[in-house]
Image (spheres, rainbow, N blue to C red):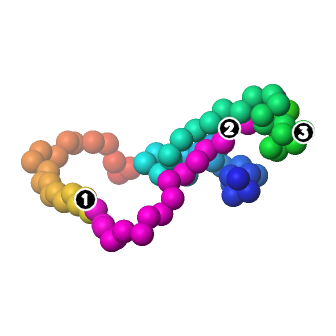
Amino acid sequence: MRMVRRLWAMGAENPISFMHPLDIERIDILKDADATSIYGSRAATGAIQITTKKGKAERHTTDINLRTGWGKITQKLAVLTTQ
């Protein structure tokens, strides 16, 4: 939560955009008394609690996606130049 506040203070538009969607386990919306009991008066109007997935003791895997390509200009356009 502190990191989200710091990113927001640094001028980031949306701190949630730094999170990968597959890392999110669940999103809870806390209203009124629920939010106030956990976060105090700062969350009197409500709070959003994001729970991320926890690491598991499994074998590590890596997924790699590669794209390559090449191109050739077949026809050049005659455009205006500064000359």
Residue 41 horizontal/vertical position (percent): 90, 39
Q: Is residue 72 visible?
A: yes
Local SS, label 1: loop
* Residue count near mark 3 (Cα–Cα under 10 Å), binned few <14, some 14–19, many ≥20: few
Question: In the figure, 33 relative to 15: above or below?
Answer: above
In the image, which disc is placed on residue 65?
1
Mark 3: which amino acid? Ser
Local SS, label 3: helix
Query: Gap in Å between the C-alphas at discs 2 and 3?
Result: 15 Å
Q: Specify start and end residues of the magenta stretch as a single range.
A: 45-63
For marks 1 and 3 on the same chain, the one whose residue lies earlier in the sequence:
3
For marks 2 and 1 on the same chain, the one whose residue lies earlier in the sequence:
2
Residue 10 horizontal/vertical position (percent): 72, 55
Circle 1/circle 3 CB separation < 8 Å? no
For marks 2 and 3 on the same chain, the one whose residue lies earlier in the sequence:
3
Query: Gap in Å between the C-alphas at discs 2 and 1?
Result: 33 Å
* Residue count near mark 2 (Cα–Cα under 10 Å), binned few <14, some 14–19, many ≥20: few
Residue at (78, 36) in percent of width and height? 35
In the image, which disc is placed on residue 41?
3
Question: In the figure, 31 relative to 61: above or below?
Answer: above
Q: Determine which quarter of the picture holds residue 27.
A: top right
Numbered disc in front, either 1 or 3 = 3
Mark 2: which amino acid? Ile
In the image, which disc is placed on residue 42?
none
Residue at (16, 46) in percent of width and height? 76
Residue 38 horizontal/vertical position (percent): 80, 44
